Image (tube, rainbow, N blue to C red):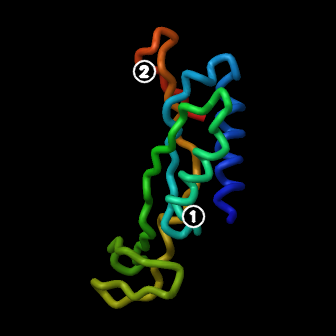
Amino acid sequence: MHEMGIAESVLDIVRLHVPEAQAPLVRRVSLRVGELAGVQTDSLRFCFEAIVAGTPYGAATLAIEYIPALRRCRACGTTFPGGPLLAVCPTCGGVDAPLEGGGELSVTEVELDDEDGAEGQQMTP
């Protein structure tokens, strides 16, 4: 299950940007996960919860933004859904339509509570 490795990498990124003294303040880690990234988001959530349990980062949860696979036809400019296989433009029938999104896998934000417990502070790795 490569989701465990991804979850560990996400936690490593959080540790890099949030000192352990502030770890209990981490509430949410936001990710962008593309359709073509090959990641099972439910498994990733489960793995992340498992690795932060019992650590100073234990209150952290994942917020996952799903990014669909998109293609843009070079002939007419139409953007349309499309996976890794050859895709035909629904507007003009062209087949020169490279992927424009869907392969993303990145940490976009780490949200911390303020020292007094109020939500607020955000860090962008």
Circle 1 sits on which residue? 39
Please determine whether, in this image, residue 65 is positioned above or below residue 20.
Answer: below
Q: Kindly give the residue lying farthest to the front in the view shown.
A: 54
Circle 2 sits on which residue? 120
The spot of residue 72 in percent (x, y) is 41, 72
Q: Please tell me which residue is depicted at 49% across the width and 88% down the height of the picture.
A: 86
Please determine whether, in this image, residue 90 is positioned above or below residue 125.
Answer: below
Q: Residue 74 carries which label?
A: none
- Badge 1 vs badge 2, beta-carbon distance below 8 Å: no
Question: In this view of the protein, which residue sits in the foreground, 79 or 76?
Answer: 79
25 to the left or right of 73: right
Question: In this view of the protein, which residue sits in the foreground, 74 or 43?
Answer: 43
Q: How many marks?
A: 2
- For marks 1 and 2, the one nearer the N-term is 1
The spot of residue 64 in percent (x, y) is 46, 50
Label 2, residues with CA under 10 Å away: few <14, some 14-19, many ≥20: few
Q: In which quarter of the image is residue 110?
A: top right
Considering the numbered disc 2 on the image, is that residue within a helix, a strand or a loop?
A: strand
Q: Quadrant of residue 87?
A: bottom left
Q: Please tell me which residue is depicted at 65% across the width and 44% down the height of the picture.
A: 10
For badge 1, the amino acid type reads Val
The spot of residue 65 in percent (x, y) is 43, 52
Q: Distance between the residues labelled 1 and 2?
A: 29 Å
The spot of residue 41 in percent (x, y) is 51, 59
Considering the numbered disc 1 on the image, is that residue within a helix, a strand or a loop?
A: loop
For badge 2, the amino acid type reads Gly
